[in-house]
Image (tube, helix red, strand yellow):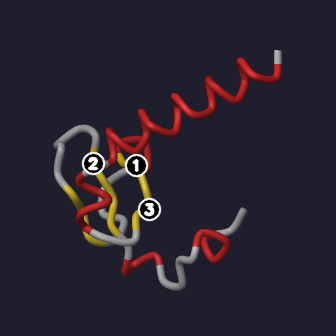
Amino acid sequence: MSKQDWGIEDPEHTYWFNTRTGEVEEGPQSLSVDRIGPFASRDEAARANEIVAERAKRWAEEDAAED
């Protein structure tokens, strides 16, 4: 899946959540191992942990329904 499939035209105009520092970054600034994203807005990036938890829960529910 490409970044354009995610609706991202220019990765420099995206937001990332740095898991090491807890800070939102504009554009990819830190090592990929330390960041989650990309996100379309600063607010989404600030909610990165919440978004990841929601997605993990949804995937677990889908997996359980398939069994």
**Residue 67, located in which quarter of the rendered image?**
top right
Q: Quadrant of the N terminus?
A: bottom right
Q: Amino acid at mark 1?
A: Ile
Residue at point 39% right, 71% down? Answer: 40
Question: In terms of secondary structure, where does tag 1 sit?
Answer: strand
Which element is circle 2 on? strand
Name the amino acid type tagged 3: Pro
Picture residue at 71% right of the left edge, 18% below the top:
64
Q: Quadrant of residue 26?
A: bottom left
x then y, percent, for residue 15: 33, 67
> Circle 3 — which element?
strand
Foreground residue among 56 and 24: 56
Question: Is 28 above or below relative to 46?
Answer: below
Q: Nearer the viewer, residue 38 or 34?
A: 38
Quick one: 55 or 1, which is closer to the camera? Answer: 55
Residue 16 percent location from the top left of the image: 33, 59
Dot placed on the residue nearer the N-terminal end, 2 or 1: 2
Q: Which residue: 17% across, 42% down?
A: 21
Name the amino acid, label 2: Asn
Circles 2 and 1 in contact, beta carbons < 8 Å: no
Report the Cα–Cα distance between label 3 and label 2. Answer: 11 Å
Task: Give the numbered dot on residue 38.
Answer: 3
Q: Residues within 10 Å of mark 2 (few under 14, many from 20)?
A: many
Residue linked to disc 1: 36
Q: What residue did someone put label 2 on?
A: 18
Task: Tell us which disc is closer to us: 3 or 2.
Answer: 3
> How busy is the neighbourhood of tag 3: few (under 14 within 10 Å), some, or many (20 plus)?
many
Distance between mark 3 and mark 1 Cα atoms? 7 Å
Q: Where's residue 24, x and y in %?
A: 21, 58
